[in-house]
Amino acid sequence: MITDNRMHKLHDDILDLFHATISRFPPQHAPFIQAAMPYKIGEYLVELGYITPRELRQVLQHAKGAHHVGLDLVRGDVIPAPVLPAILLIQFLDRIERESQPTPRFMGERLLLNGLLEARQLADGLGEQIATYQHGDWVRLGEILTHRGWLAESSISN
């Protein structure tokens, strides 16, 4: 699994990326701190001030599915595209810090935990995936990562 040193580096890399992103794209609204730690992407965006609770309710009413909320917010120009990968990485970081033995839910998480990919690479790959989605296409993350030369195809199929 992941060593303490690798976990500390991953933690620092994700936080550095997050802080750089919010410095470039500051939230439009005041933070809305909730009692419980957020678990869903929309809750993170509300808590950080990127959207209001009303905007979240509206997007949830029209979203194609739970996995499309962040993408729909980017596509609708409600949040800047670079914010979504940074928030997804913070969401992942919060989850692995809560769990004693984190189980990756997505391929990118598995690649980070196994040390096969750096946080910046994953953020850039997710950013490219989001950009293609904004233009009406969908490219698998694995295709983007292998095309950029960051991974061998064998790393994805395992």
Image: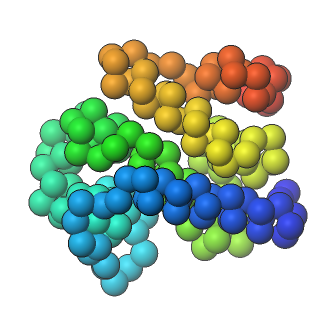
Colour scheme shown: rainbow
On-image quarter of the C terminus: top right
Name the residue: 67% across, 39% down: 121
Task: Answer with left or right where residue 126 lies relative to residue 104.
Answer: left
Name the residue: 65% across, 45% down: 120
Residue 84 picture location, percent across and down? 42, 46
> Furthest residue to the bottom?
35
In the image, is residue 57 above or below residue 68? below
On-image quarter of the N terminus: bottom right
Residue 91 picture location, percent across and down? 51, 59
Task: Answer with left or right where residue 88 lies relative to residue 104.
Answer: left
Q: Nearer the viewer, residue 48 or 152?
A: 48
Number of on-image labels: 0
Q: Is residue 69 visible?
A: no
Name the residue: 75% across, 52% down: 113
Task: Answer with left or right where residue 1 lies relative to residue 17.
Answer: right
Name the residue: 34% across, 44% down: 80
Residue 26 picture location, percent across and down? 35, 59
Quarter of image, res 36: bottom left
Residue 127 picture location, percent across and down? 50, 35
